[in-house]
Image (spheres, rainbow, N blue to C red):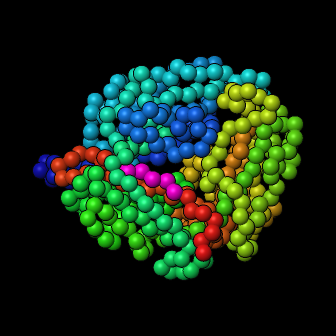
Amino acid sequence: MKRVVSFLFLFLIVAFNGKTEEIYNTSVFSRTIKNLQIKNAGEFFSNPVINLNGDKQLEINFDVLGDGYTRYAYSIVHCNADWTPSPVLPIEYISGFQGTTIDDFANSMATTTAYANYRFYLPNEDVQFKLSGNYAVKVYDESEPDKILFTACFYVAESLVSISTKISGITDIDVNKNHQQLEFSIDHKNFPIPHPLTDMKVCVYQNERRDNFVTDLKPSSILQNQLVYSHNSELIFKAGNEYRRMEFLSNKYNGMHVEQVQFFNPFYHMTLFPDHSRNQFSYQYDQDQNGRFFTRCSDCSDPDTEADYFIVHFTLAEDEIPGGDVYLNGQFLCNNFNEESRMEYNHEAGQYEKSLLLKAGSYNYQYLFVPDGEKIGLTYPVEGDFAETENEYTIAVYYRPIGARYDRLIGFERVQNSMSVF
């Protein structure tokens, strides 16, 4: 009997210690949820960030395939700097209640694909934020609260420190070739930080990609009221290439990068021109939006409800790359590597292929190669790496002194390098 009790005790210890905390990411878990957008209200392109007690709102907008109305609700989770749930309670980080319903919706009009468009704004009359930091909102059918349909991540910041940045193609490992190096300084003269090495966390994102973001950076110099981050090898990023672009606004004509439009009941199909590897060519500038997308349609007044859906066919006409998978990447796929974004290799045709149901609009995308057993997408195998590439870098500065229970977001800066790196 003692052996049985001891075994069960050890089993419980192992099970408890082996439990991993959930890491929140913007992700869709239902095939009926489409076109998820998280942005500042009234803006086409923006990082999902608002200031604590500021006058801006976040808009979370999504479609549900099919007719009719379903009562959807949302709950909000406060997160640590690494996007794991923080220990603070909802009553501490929001005013209002969890499980607020989403009442702003409209059915699609005159589209071949029926859908309902939903949106809600944060903060609102029912929900206000008390603390800064990382946040995730979980959306679900009100009748099935344990079945999460999608999560959307965003930031609530306090402007307590200022951040100065510099991006250069002249890095500590090469000069104007394949990398970019970020340097920055944090001025905290109006916000004393007695112990920056233990009380601060700094995270850096390139083009809002979570797979290659850098965290737990340490300053190279600590000056009076200033922290300097320079000549740090962790701040050297693969430069990548400008995102590819496509646009389709109507079924009546081909859009940008669209080779053919056909109708096979019940969908219109947009076949894109075949894409090819760009890693052997020289850099060519193209004005992109660093992976973003937005909904548009021709001859319509409200794209949210009048833009139609099309099955879009992507082709990467290249030999199969051994030792990993090629993924389609962009914010319309939440920058995630999963079955929806993984390209299938057609051995008979000798090319990678993918078909997705997408709403009319303008899109940025790229192809990333993920080696077997790895989690970081590589640009070089398909897109190439060029120091001249315009990229967007986001710097998030968190503060948690000894005894505090959450990471306070005290600074947030987004910067884009100019095309010239010389």
- Count of numbered labels shown in the rendering: 0
Which picture quadrant has residue 419? Answer: bottom right
Compared with 227, 142 (above or below) is above
Residue 381 picture location, percent across and down: 65, 70
Seen in the image, is 50 located left or right of residue 364?
left
Residue ID at (52%, 53%): 208
Viewer-proximal residue, 369 or 13?
Answer: 369
Instruction: Determine if residue 254 is in view.
Output: yes
Residue 116 picture location, percent across and down: 64, 25
Instruction: Determine if residue 23 is in view.
Output: no
Viewer-proximal residue, 208 or 137?
Answer: 208
Residue ID at (44%, 67%): 183
Compared with 222, 107 (above or below) is above
Seen in the image, is 75 located left or right of residue 206?
left
Q: Quadrant of the C terminus?
A: bottom right
Residue ID at (62%, 36%): 34
Specify the segment rendered in magenta: 411-415
**Residue 386 inside the magenta-drawn segment:** no
Viewer-proximal residue, 362 or 2?
Answer: 362
Residue 184 picture location, percent across and down: 42, 64
Residue ID at (67%, 58%): 243
Residue 32 picture location, percent across and down: 61, 33
Compared with 177, 305 (above or below) is above
- Magenta segment's dominant SS is strand
